[in-house]
Image: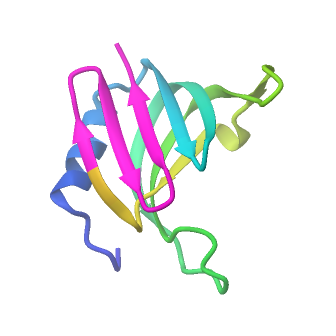
Amino acid sequence: MHRKPTEDDLELEKTLNQLNGKVIQIKKEMNRDVDVTTMTLSSAALHERPPTIDGYVSPYVLRLKGKGKISTSDGQYEQIPYDLYEIPLTDKLHTHVNPNHISIKTEEATFTITYH
């Protein structure tokens, strides 16, 4: 990886991998828009991608793999594409790991992962 993982990144990956096989809920809040994804987690990994020309895609992400669904604006559900959910970590401001949830705040959005 060109970007060295921080202690927070490594703790986040370790904590999530302890939840493999469990159902998690990911809430993404961005500009008054809220997306909720529910998935059965099979793995979590830090991943670096080559930078894009326009910089639109974050080159450093937390990849969550598993079967799941995302709620749509009309109250319906759709399958997660490729059984993959990515949280950009390039512009991460802070991470908090708590007993029942994890909060990741970036410059663009806040992600809350809840589990039981």
In the rendered structure, which segment of residues is drawn in magenta? 95-116
Location of residue 64 with respect to 66 vertically, above or below: below
Pick the quarter of the image with the C terminus.
top left
Total count of labels: 0
Location of residue 90 with respect to 50 vertically, above or below: above
Q: Residue furthest front?
A: 32
Q: Residue furthest top?
A: 116
**Residue in the picture at 45% in, 46% down:** 110
Task: Give the side of residue 9 with respect to residue 113, left or right.
Answer: left
Task: Give the side of residue 56 with respect to residue 108, left or right.
Answer: right
Location of residue 23 with respect to 13 vertically, above or below: above
> How is the rendered protein coloured?
rainbow
The image quarter in which residue 44 lies? top left
Task: Give the side of residue 12 with respect to residue 42, left or right.
Answer: left
**Residue in the picture at 55% in, 80% down:** 51
Pick the quarter of the image with the N terminus.
bottom left
Q: Main secondary structure of the magenta part?
A: strand
Q: Where is residue 9 in the image (x, y as percent from the top left)?
A: 26, 54
Q: Which residue lies furthest to the left in this view?
A: 7
Q: Position of residue 37 (x, y in %)?
A: 60, 29
104 or 87, which is in the foreground?
104
Q: Is residue 99 magenta?
A: yes
**Residue in the picture at 83% in, 25% down:** 74
Q: Where is residue 45 in the image (x, y as percent from the top left)?
A: 39, 49
Q: Is residue 75 magenta?
A: no
**Residue in the picture at 43% in, 20% down:** 21
